[in-house]
Image (spheres, rainbow, N blue to C red):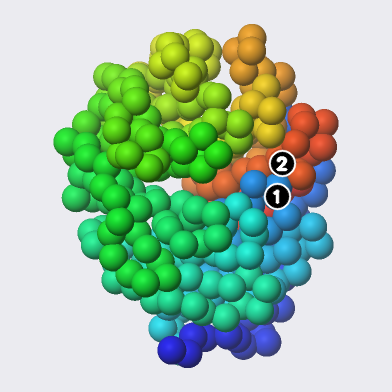
Amino acid sequence: MNYLKHISRLSLKLLSLPLLLIACSGGTAPESSFEYAVQGLYSAELSDNGSLAFVGSINHGGSLWRASDNARRFNWNHRQGQFTEITNAAFSPDLNYAITATPQTMVLWNIKNGASMAYWTAPSEILDIRLLPDAQLALLGLADHTAALFDVRNGGVKQVFYHQARVTSVDFNSRQHLVLSGSDDYSAKLWHLQTGDVLYEWPHKAEVQLVKLSPNGKLAFTMSKYDKAALWDTTTGESKGEIPLATSALSRGLSFTAVAFSNNGDYLLTGTSHRTVQLWDTNTLTEVKQWIMPKRDAVAPTSASVLALAFNGGGSANAGYRVITSDGFIHQLK
């Protein structure tokens, strides 16, 4: 199957032009900002080390970027001659492969040469996706009340993890053989990757919208929009505490839209639907630093959600950070 590899030179130039953004207040500003999409994004993803970025543009389909110098590598769409509305994407841990998804379809890509490797129809509406090592399997969060391990090389569902409502967020840790899923059934569940057994179930008072496992597999993060953002010990199942969010903010539906752990799990980077990025110490559950992403237009009422973020190099809290926002910009933070 052939896929669209190029868009017009004019579109490339437009997407590559940096804009003068409106200075922000109430937090530290980014060191630099660069435009990846003119009219905003459906989706975005950063590799764990922040070196690669994928964006699903509203007007120009999907594209892979090298984040270090903001160089566009490839244009990825699911049908030749059409711009695909890509709603989810993920990188394999070895950064050799990536997967892109619409609610109904998936395409596996080779990062080195940009070639498409497989095209599949989803078993149900895809709400979230992660790509396991060697890109043999993809972990899907699905609208049919399941998380599923899908064979992206040969097709077919290999393992199913059941909830009582839509599974909106998923993550995995292959070293510790863990799967984490968050659902509209007000719960997050930690599973054994190979046996499919539930290890722990963590209740919330509203839909669980975001989950994440630390790289070492020792911590789990779960976020419920009107309830709490919590950290859990994956060995004992015990609570490690909650991210300190004001009750008034939770009642208004304040939620994190993206999250990343440092390599050692000592720090947590979070982003919100209101342009805010925060760094947290996971041992003390205190805020270390806060940034406010700039606006395109100072008088426009619209804001921008944080869609993806990463620690540069995946490592310490001193290496800097990269953030992609829904208005089409990547930001470098320090």
For the residues labelled 1 and 2, say whether their Cβ atoms are less than 8 Å apart. yes
Q: Is residue 71 above or below residue 81?
A: above
Residue 248 location, x and y as percent?
41, 14
Q: Where 102 falls versus 49 (above or below)?
A: below
| Mark 1 element type | loop
Whole-number angstrom distance, CA of label 1 to CA of label 2: 7 Å
Residue 210 seen from this side: no
Are there few (<14), some (14-19), or many (20+) residues within 10 Å of tag 2?
many
How packed is label 1: few (under 14 Cα within 10 Å), some, or many (20 or more)? many
Tell me the residue that label 1 is attached to: 50
The extreme front residue here reads: 195
> Which amino acid type is marked by label 2?
Gly
Tell me if 38 is positioned left or right of 213 in this view: right
Q: Nearer the viewer, mark 1 or mark 2?
A: 2
Vertical comparison of 73 with 217: above or below: below
Q: Which residue is at a point 46% across and 52% down the rendered structure image?
A: 130
* Picture mark count: 2
Residue closest to the eye, 52 or 26: 52
Q: Quadrant of residue 12?
A: bottom right
Residue at which label 2 appears: 314
Horizontally, residue 181 falls left or right of residue 292, namely left
User: In this orientation, which residue lies closer to the viewer: 105 or 328?
Assistant: 105
Q: Indicate the position of residue 178 as horizontal and vertical percent values.
A: 44, 36
Residue 44 position in % (x across, y down): 54, 56
Where residue 271 sits in the image (x, y, percent)? Answer: 56, 35
Residue 137 appears left or right of 17: left
* SS class, disc 2: helix
Q: Nearer the viewer, residue 314 or 326?
A: 314
